[in-house]
Image (cartoon, grey):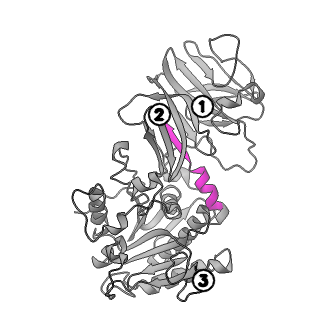
Amino acid sequence: MRLPLFLFFLLVIPTQLLAVDFSFHQNTGVKSGPTLLVIGGVDGDEPGGFHAAATLVTRYRIEKGNLWIVPNLNSEAILKRVRGDMNLKFAAVSKSDPQYASIKRIKSIITESQVDLILNLHDGSGFYHPTRINSQRNPNRWGQSCVIDQKQLPGAHFGQLQELAETAIQQVNKKVQAKDHYFQLKNMNTASTTKDIPAKKSLSFFAVSHNKPTIAVEASKKYPVHLRTYYHLEALESFMQQMGITFRRDFPLTPAGVKQVIKDDALISLAEGRIQLELNNMRTSVKHFPLAKTVEPDFSSRNPLITLQPTEEQYRLHYGNNRLAFLDPLYVELDRSIEGVEILIDGVPQDIPFGSIVPVQKKFLVNNQKGYRVNVIGFAKSDQSSDGHFQIGQNQLNKSYSIDKAGQLYRVEVYKGKRFSGMVLVDFRPQKGSTVAHFRPVNPKPEEHLN
């Protein structure tokens, strides 16, 4: 049965299920065309691959054709920051295996009749080279290669695997940042070998065995994550172009542009959108953080690599396999009677929706509303009523209460009695050159997000 089509669908899954499931996204163009399935995160310690797949979700819009994306296939291994053994279970897996449901589900997506080509994203060791040069550059290494199981898959629409891979390699090699970054083709000849090699148990060979053209892209683990992600995206764009899939993206495809995207996509929304956190450079622990007490954490993010995991008495923010801050919850009930506050920012009054991150150069003042209490976390005052109607500068705030380690990002919380109305973050960071979209919703529509 054909899976339903939808645009930028994020499968929101309960935290308890993260160990056995993954998110699946379908980006459908206005014009019909072939379907490319991109899979990242089958190995949990390969962030270049899963960040590239996540960037396809957050920053690309397909105009012709279809892009299906699984950015976090082995989500448990990603959270644990380990490789995991999922990629060795595609030949056979026991029903009692904790990953059985995930493997069964991804197999059903792989074998869906609409899928024309599959790209399996990895970060590989060292640098592949067909002849031995040294311990890091030899036939047993994987980095900077496109990997195929055989030259072609007869009868498949995009079955010319070697030709597709060689074309992508040529295009990527025009954009390498240094001469020793060149990609090469690695043919495993999986079906024809008599050896019992791990490739015979892999996702890629399962797909090829079911007549689905599949190519693995391996960026070298020797490079920083943003550079690995950049090379993956260069290869992905080449394959999309070869397939006739047309697209738009909202950032320059350069190593610096990709590094900024990874940074800017580190946003999470909580409390029905009344809180938005930027996760860069966060303190390791944020005390007395207002959260609605629910069975499952109430959060959303346009980036599928961002999760909120419960611990014993706290919640921990994860961005891919980066373990970020602990939130020490102050459990509250939500007040939905207002949607924002008026703040005088550097002398200019502005109506600020809850969930915003607002730049301040010198001072801000939150206008009190009757029946509501303003609490500026880190501001010491003589009474215990409201922090509204106080002109507050950065030097009046206690750095130990900031959201970030640098002491430049602070919480403004609004309450109606004991009920939590919402939060605004005031941002004293220098704004020159910043691309952080302070008023951007966490889950924008593609039309709003793309230029």
Q: CA distance from mark 2 to mark 3?
A: 48 Å
User: Label 3: which residue?
Assistant: 134
User: Label 1: which residue?
Assistant: 424
Residue 149 appears at what percent x and percent y? 38, 82
Disc 1 on helix, strand or loop? strand
Residue 35 appears at what percent x and percent y? 38, 70
Please say if 205 is above or below 271.
Answer: below
Residue 165 appears at what percent x and percent y? 48, 82
Nearer the observer, 99 or 312:
312
Which residue is painted at 37% across and 49% down in the image? 18
- Indicate the amino acid at tag 1: Val
User: Is 427 on the left or on the right of 279, as rendered?
Assistant: right
Q: Quadrant of residue 144?
A: bottom right
User: Is 324 on the left or on the right of 396, as rendered?
Assistant: left
Contact check, label 1 and label 2, Cβ < 8 Å? no
Circle 3 Cα neighbour tier, 10 Å, few/some/many (<14 / 14–19 / ≥20): few
- Indicate the amino acid at tag 3: Asn
Q: CA distance from mark 1 to mark 3?
A: 54 Å
User: Label 2: which residue?
Assistant: 314
Q: Is residue 265 magenta?
A: yes
Q: Quick one: label 1 or label 3, which is nearer the N terminus?
A: 3
Q: Quick one: label 2 or label 3, which is nearer the N terminus?
A: 3
- Indicate the amino acid at tag 2: Gln
Quadrant containing the C terminus in the rendered view: bottom right
Nearer the observer, 133 or 223:
133
Q: Majority secondary structure of the magenta segment?
A: helix
> Which range of residues does the magenta coloring cover?
257-271
Q: Is residue 419 magenta?
A: no
Residue farthest front in this picture: 135
Circle 1 Cα neighbour tier, 10 Å, few/some/many (<14 / 14–19 / ≥20): many
Q: Quadrant of residue 157?
A: bottom left
